[in-house]
Image (tube, grey):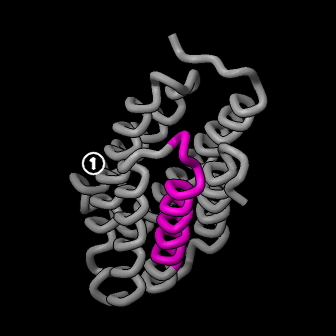
């Protein structure tokens, strides 16, 4: 699955969009269901990121693995402690998005010397970081608002990850070019 560059980003993007659509389709889901859905999403996203680190030597960066491990840890906490997580879901999701977004920004900046379309990765990290900050500093948004924000964030991030994956696939099929 990870032999072609960009495949991991396409998978992560598709998973993110599915996650967002599930939230929209099931608005009356309980906090426990949202916590478990977030936990599963974060674990799969993290595993995909870590796998990408090992299967894509050209795009290897320690920030890829850091972001993946953070996602896995957040997912495990959410599933192992759903009651506490439901009470603190805003803080957990906010911290997760903030740290993951910052790691994506750092990765995109590191990739700019050899990836022409590194800006999409940067925007993905920026959107993720802004989402994290908004959730952390607005705990009174209410659970339903958080659910709708999470759905929008997941779909937007999914679309950006898919765009990045398509760009990497195009890059792999073209002659080597370096960013200027």
The single residue placed furthest to the left in the displayed view is 137
Question: Who's the residue at 57% across and 21% down the image?
Answer: 116
Read off the residue under disc 1. Answer: 133
Q: Main secondary structure of the magenta part?
A: helix
- Coordinates of residue 169 in the picture (x, y in percent): 72, 37
- Which residue range is magenta in the image? 37-59
Q: Is the residue 100 above or below the residue 30 in the image? A: above
Element under label 1? helix
Residue 131 appearing in the image:
no
- Coordinates of residue 79 in the picture (x, y in percent): 42, 85
Task: Report if residue 62 lies within the magenta region.
Answer: no
| Closer to us: 111 or 88 | 111
Q: Quadrant of residue 44?
A: bottom right
Question: Who's the residue at 55% across and 40% down the image?
Answer: 58
| Closer to us: 68 or 90 | 68
Task: Report if residue 42 lies within the magenta region.
Answer: yes
Q: Is the residue 52 above or below the residue 58 in the image? A: below
- Coordinates of residue 5 in the picture (x, y in percent): 67, 44
Residue 119 appearing in the image:
yes
- Coordinates of residue 46 in the picture (x, y in percent): 47, 65
Q: Quadrant of residue 151?
A: bottom right
- Quadrant the N terminus occupies: bottom right
The single residue placed furthest to the right in the displayed view is 173
Q: Is the residue 84 above or below the residue 119 in the image? A: below
Question: Who's the residue at 69% across and 29% down the image?
Answer: 171
Question: Who's the residue at 58% across and 68% down the image?
Answer: 23
């Amino acid at each position: 699955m990870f032999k072609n560059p960009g495949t991991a980003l396409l998978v992560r993007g598709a998973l993110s969009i599915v996650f967002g659509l599930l939230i929209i389709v099931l608005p009356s889901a309980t906090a426990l269901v949202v916590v478990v859905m977030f936990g599963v999403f974060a674990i799969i996203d993290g595993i995909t990121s870590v796998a990408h680190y090992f299967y894509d030597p050209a795009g290897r960066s320690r920030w890829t693995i850091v972001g993946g491990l953070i996602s896995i840890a957040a997912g495990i906490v959410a599933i192992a402690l759903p009651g506490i997580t439901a009470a603190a879901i805003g803080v957990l999701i906010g911290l997760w998005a903030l740290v993951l977004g910052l790691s994506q920004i750092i990765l995109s900046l590191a990739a700019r010397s050899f990836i022409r379309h590194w800006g999409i990765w940067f925007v993905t990290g920026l959107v993720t970081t802004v989402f994290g900050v908004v959730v952390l500093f607005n705990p009174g948004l209410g659970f339903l608002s958080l659910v709708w924000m999470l759905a929008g964030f997941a779909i937007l991030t999914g679309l950006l990850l898919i765009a990045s994956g398509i760009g990497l696939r195009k890059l792999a099929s073209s002659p080597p070019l370096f960013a200027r």
